[in-house]
Amino acid sequence: LIFLPFVIFASLVVLSMLCFHRAPGIIWALMVAALLLSLLFMVVRQQRLGPKFWMNLGGMCFLAILAGSVAGLWNYNSHAYKYWAYKGQRTYEDLRASEAAASYLDAGRLSFLDDVEVDVNKVLGYKDGQVFCVAPVVGSSPQGRIEFWAAGVDCCGQDGVGPFACEDASQPETHGGLVHLEDELFSDNFVDKFRAAVKDADSKLGLTSSKDALFLRWLSDPAAAQLRWWSDGIAFAVKSCIAYFFFSLVSGVALHFARRNLSKPKLSAQRR
């Protein structure tokens, strides 16, 4: 009543984080197999009167499957998926601000030369519930159009007029970051909003934006930011498993003693 439900819950949480990105079909098959196992326990012929051991075990396993599936998939979508998404993208280093963004559409991380920075005083904001802020990434040499934009949310004033203060943009030693990926499963997929912000670049700032421009989270340590999703996923998995173990322990002990107490009248009646 304690060990097997906990193992099912922990397995679903851990496997969802580690394997769902590569083999979602296998994870779904495991969920279905565990569900069938719990139903099998529920229909096993009972050998005792009173509370049913196999019925209780099946019910505990069924609850573990539901809880493990929900927790595992939530953790995957919230943390692990983002880590694996960037893991599948390429990293480019020593870029110039004037290089064509179209050559780096498969990028997840970009690192620029030391003369490249965010012009925090040239800000564009697009308001749609939140303020979606962008600022051009520029080098020391003049460039015909902007290929890269630093981008963030609610970090350039309420009206989007600046200055640009998203993440590490104000740190002069920062020269790169993570590309905002255009992915439907990302809860913070704001690429369309950032594109809407740069539409007025010419009229407001006198800048021309590349149609293939990339938007970046300007970060001093993009590798650490990517790893943070993995760390958060592990932390959630560990905490949820610990919490479910204690839940399973309390529930299992309660069901065990309830079954024993309710079986005592039957034993007394047999002795008489």
Image (tube, rainbow, N blue to C red):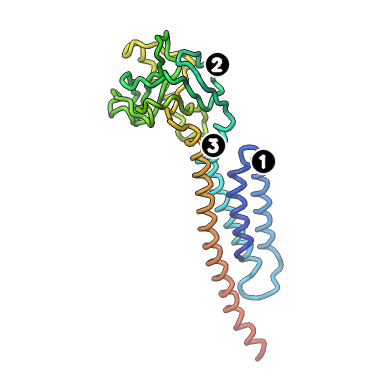
Q: Where is residue 200 in the image (x, y as percent from the top left)?
A: 35, 15
Q: Which of marks 3 and 2 is nearer the N terminus?
A: 3
From the image, which quarter does the N terminus lie in?
Answer: bottom right
Quadrant hosting residue 192: top left
| Residue 259, quarter of the rendered image | bottom right
Residue 39, image x and y in percent? 66, 58
* SS state under label 3: helix
Residue placed at 58% from the left, 49% from the top?
Answer: 13
Q: What residue type is labelled 2?
A: Ser
x and y, in percent, of residue 262 in the image: 58, 78
Query: Tag 2's secondary structure?
Result: helix
C-alpha gap between disc 1 and disc 2: 34 Å
For the residue pair 92 and 156, the one nearer the viewer reads as 92
Q: From the top left corner, tell me how far across and down residue 147 is, in percent.
A: 45, 15
- Three-letter amino acid code at the position of disc 1: Gly
Alpha carbon separation for disc pair 3 and 1: 20 Å
Disc 1 secondary structure class: helix
Looking at the image, which is closer to me, 242 or 61? 242
Q: Residues within 10 Å of mark 3 (few under 14, many from 20)?
A: many
Query: Residue at the spot x=50%, y=53% of the render?
Result: 239
Viewer-proximal residue among 116 and 162? 116
Residue holding disc 2: 103
Q: What residue is pinned by disc 3?
A: 83
Q: Quadrant of the C terminus?
A: bottom right
Tag 1–tag 2 contact (CB < 8 Å): no
Q: Name the residue under label 1.
A: 25
* For residue 123, side relative to residue 7 (left or right): left
